[in-house]
Image (spheres, rainbow, N blue to C red):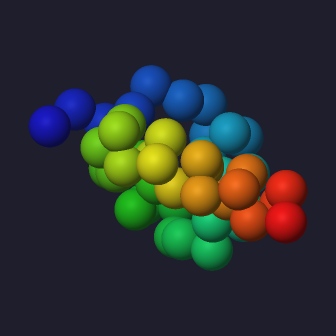
Amino acid sequence: MRSLHISAETAVKLSEKLGVPIEQIMHMPQHILIQKLTELEKEKEK
């Protein structure tokens, strides 16, 4: 499994939004990260 190709700044922002450690963000599979971001957006719409 490859790490995500995102900047450190993006990783920090995602970590804060998702409440997940930065290390976990960097090693999270892309499809799971997208799923979590989708869930976050759905919660925001409510």
Q: For the view shown, which residue lies furthest in the top direction?
A: 5
Residue 14 point in image, percent of width and height:
65, 52
Q: Which of 9 and 20 is in front in this view?
A: 20
Q: For the view shown, which residue lies furthest in the right direction?
A: 45
How many numbered dots are placed on residues in this image? 0
Residue 9 point in image, percent of width and height:
72, 40
* Quadrant assignment for the N terminus: top left
| Residue 45: quarter of image | bottom right
Residue 2 point in image, percent of width and height:
22, 32
Q: Nearer the viewer, residue 18 or 13?
A: 18
- The residue at 59%/58% (across/down) is 39
Residue 19 point in image, percent of width and height:
63, 74
The image shows residue 22, relative to residue 33, as above or below, that is below
- The residue at 35%/39% (across/down) is 31
* Quadrant assignment for the C terminus: bottom right
The image shows residue 6, relative to residue 40, as above or below, that is above
- The residue at 54%/29% (across/down) is 6
Q: Which of 36 and 2 is in front in this view?
A: 36
The answer to whether residue 20 of the structure is visible from this angle is yes
The answer to whether residue 12 of the structure is visible from this angle is no
Q: For the view shown, which residue lies furthest in the left direction?
A: 1
- The residue at 37%/49% (across/down) is 32
Judged left or right of residue 10, residue 34 is left
